[in-house]
Amino acid sequence: MSDPKNPFEAMLAQAQEMAKALNPALEDVSAKGFEALWPTMPKEAMEMMFGKSANPDGLDAKTRLLLTLAGLTCQGAQAETALRQTVRHAVEAGAKKQEIVETIGQMSAFAGIPAMTKALETAQEVLDAQGDDES
């Protein structure tokens, strides 16, 4: 089995063993591939759901997504899929590369350098995949 101090890791290992027993071809399947199946929401939909529709004087979708990115970084950048999707949606909502980098960089004071570095690397992968050439 795995380390009893990490029940989530044990659960994932058990699920992987079960999938392998059911179908050996599933051994190499990774959950990371599923994030590509989730489309990027259009900016208008994000504004409707997360923006100013409920509170006209509130935060816009871009600001909310940058705050979400900050929170994910402060959690140690462990939720890579959520981090990737948040970066992707932040760009769609109008966030510039510099704003994303500064948001993550500022979290080094709260989350530490390792979490910031991991979040920056993950964000850079997303930005590179989108062909973002903005400085």
Image (cartoon, rainbow, N blue to C red):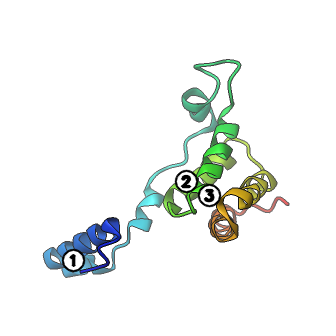
Residue at coordinates 63% horizontally, 29% vertically from top-left? 51
Write down the residue under mark 2. 85
Relative to 68, say whether 30 is above or below.
below
Residue 77 percent across, percent down from the top left: 57, 62
Q: Give the CA distance from mark 1 to mark 3.
A: 31 Å
Write down the residue under mark 1. 17
- Considering only order in the chain, which callout, 2 or 3, is on the residue closer to the N terminus? 3
Residue at coordinates 32% horizontally, 78% vertically from top-left? 3
Query: In the figure, residue 101 lies in which quadrant?
Result: bottom right
- Considering only order in the chain, which callout, 3 or 1, is on the residue closer to the N terminus? 1
Q: Which residue is the extreme one toward the right?
A: 135
Observer-nearest of 86 and 107: 107
Q: Type of residue at label 2?
A: Gln
Left/right of residue 132 with respect to residue 82 in the rendered view:
right
Left/right of residue 100 with respect to residue 47 in the rendered view:
right
- Considering only order in the chain, which callout, 1 or 2, is on the residue closer to the N terminus? 1
Give the crowd class for mark 1: few <14, some 14-19, many >=20 residues within 10 Å: some
The answer to whether the residue labelled 1 contacts the one labelled 3, judged by CB atoms less than 8 Å apart, is no
Q: Give the CA distance from mark 2 to mark 1.
A: 28 Å
Mark number displayed over residue 130: none
Q: Type of residue at label 3?
A: Thr
Give the crowd class for mark 3: few <14, some 14-19, many >=20 residues within 10 Å: many
Residue at coordinates 43% horizontally, 56% vertically from top-left? 37
Write down the residue under mark 3. 73
